[in-house]
Amino acid sequence: MIVGVDHINIRSSEYERAKDLFVKVLGLKEGPRPAIAKARGAWLYSGEQALVHLSATDEPTRPSKGSAIDHFALRIKDYDEAVRRLKSFGTEYRANELPDLGLRQLVVTVPGGATLELNWRDVAAPAPA
């Protein structure tokens, strides 16, 4: 029945920094957001898909790591470029490699506490079973 992930909603007490990470570093674009959304925030698009709904909050947010939803993962097309951009923005990350899956990951904490995994797959590697 499920065909994919529609969007992720992230609440951040560090809204501007979180938005900068997604837009300036990761390349999402701010786009249309329905008028019904009254709180400060943005819908951030990858192509035509509003992939990240970012909501500002004045209340302190808690880290997602260790909570019921521990992290979310997004696919990236250029691992080395992602590393370069994260470094240039001063964003700390942890790199993981899963060679059996042809997968390289960058684990980042979004300002405000959400854990984000950036996944790059080697297209020449065998697909996971």
Image (cartoon, rainbow, N blue to C red):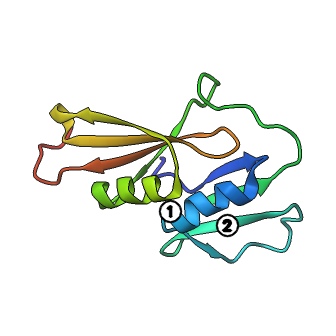
State the SS at label 1. helix
Q: Which of 23 and 4 is in front in this view?
A: 23
Above-or-below relation of 86 to 113: below
Q: Which kind of residue does numbered mark 1 sit on?
A: Val
Q: Can residue 50 be seen in this view?
A: no
Q: Disc 1 vs disc 2: which is toward the camera?
A: 1
Q: How crowded is mark 2: few (under 14 residues within 10 Å), some or many (20 or more)?
A: many
Q: Which of marks 1 and 2 is nearer the N terminus?
A: 1
Res. 110 image quadrant:
top right
Q: Do the residues labelled 1 and 2 touch (CB within 8 Å)?
A: no
Task: Check disc 1: other Cα within 10 Å, few if <14, some if 14-19, many if 20+.
Answer: some
Residue linked to disc 1:
25
Local secondary structure at mark 2: strand
Three-letter code for the amino acid on which mark 2 is drawn: Trp
Residue at coordinates 49% horizontally, 68% vertically from top-left?
A: 27
Side of 50 where 13 appears, left or right: right
Numbered tag placed on residue 118 in the rendering: none
Residue at left 57%, top 58%? Answer: 21
**Drawn side of residue 33 relative to residue 1, left or right:** right
Q: Position of residue 118 (x, y in %)?
A: 41, 47
The Cα–Cα distance between marks 1 and 2, rounded to whole angstroms, is: 16 Å
Point 64% across, 32% down: residue? 64
In the image, 62: left or right of 27?
right
Quadrant location, the C terminus: top left
Residue 37 x/y as whole percent: 84, 65
Residue 93, percent from left and from top: 45, 40
Residue at the spot of label 2 = 43
Q: Residue furthest top?
A: 66
| On screen, residue 87 above or below 27 | above
Q: Can residue 57 be seen in this view?
A: yes
Count of labels in the image: 2
